Amino acid sequence: EAAVTQSPRNKVAVTGGKVTLSCNQTNNHNNMYWYRQDTGHGLRLIHYSYGAGSTEKGDIPDGYKASRPSQENFSLILELATPSQTSVYFCASGEGQNTLYFGEGSRLIVV
Amino acid sequence: QQKVQQSPESLSVPEGGMASLNCTSSDRNFQYFWWYRQHSGEGPKALMSIFSDGDKKEGRFTAHLNKASLHVSLHIRDSQPSDSALYFCAVSLSSNTNKVVFGTGTRLQVLP
């Protein structure tokens, strides 16, 4: 089965600090996605990518940057973390219109 | 911004009963509707996709799509306690964007 690995799985950060969430996929998929999950909001798309070197803004990109240095890796960067960014973040990979494969999630608490 | 609305927010059905979940997209430029299921502490996993009008059946799960109304439903017959989970509808938008937008989710509880 397709494998998507996220790190760290849990993170406590201070307000104003920098946070990097990393995602690695071994599926050789072109597309990768970052979502955040909050009660009452479902999964909201932050950034996505078509392939190495590309990043696209999703529906809620403010306060987040993304980086896709290679086919396998896609990072989400919070330059100045705020408490409103406390959430569970999910990375996913996919190809065309096919199934998305999700990682296990990264729980971020900003204090 | 595309929106995907799901209803109800939560649903309880007895074991062996039928669960029905609904989803509507605000964007006509969709390619596929998807249903995903998420158990507690895990990432979402795909159940099935549908892109043609009518029904698509996979085991105990049946999806029904009405393109004119941008509405898709998921029906789970003979519900099992293991079906208790958070169910997401997702819309895969036009093929040149590869953008996938998820709904707010329906929490299903199957009571033994």
Image (tube, coloured by chain):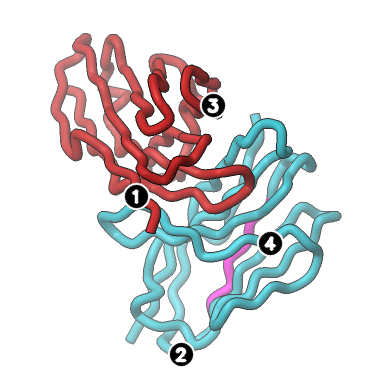
Real-space CA distance between mark 1 and mark 3, rounded to the nearest whole angstrom: 23 Å
Q: Which residue is labeled 2 in the image?
A: B16
Type of amino acid under label 3: Gly
Chain of the residue under the numbered disc 1 shown in the image: A
Which of B17/A20 is in front? A20
User: Which SS type dominates the magenta stretch?
Assistant: strand
Marks 4/2 in contact by CB < 8 Å: the verdict is no
Q: Which chain is red?
A: A
Q: Which chain is cyan?
A: B
Magenta region, residue range: B19-24
- Provide the residue designation for mark 1: A3
Q: Residues under labels 4 and 2: Cα distance? A: 25 Å
Q: Which mark is residue A43?
A: none
In the rendered structure, which disc, 1 or 3, sits on the residue that comes first in sequence? 1
- SS for tag 2? loop
Whether callout 1 and callout 3 share a subunit is answered yes
Q: Is residue B21 magenta?
A: yes
Residue B26 position (above or below residue A73):
below
Mark number for residue A58? 3
- In this view of the protein, can residue A27 be seen by the observer? yes
Dot 4, how many residues are within 10 Å of its Cα: few (below 14), some (14-19), or many (20+)?
some
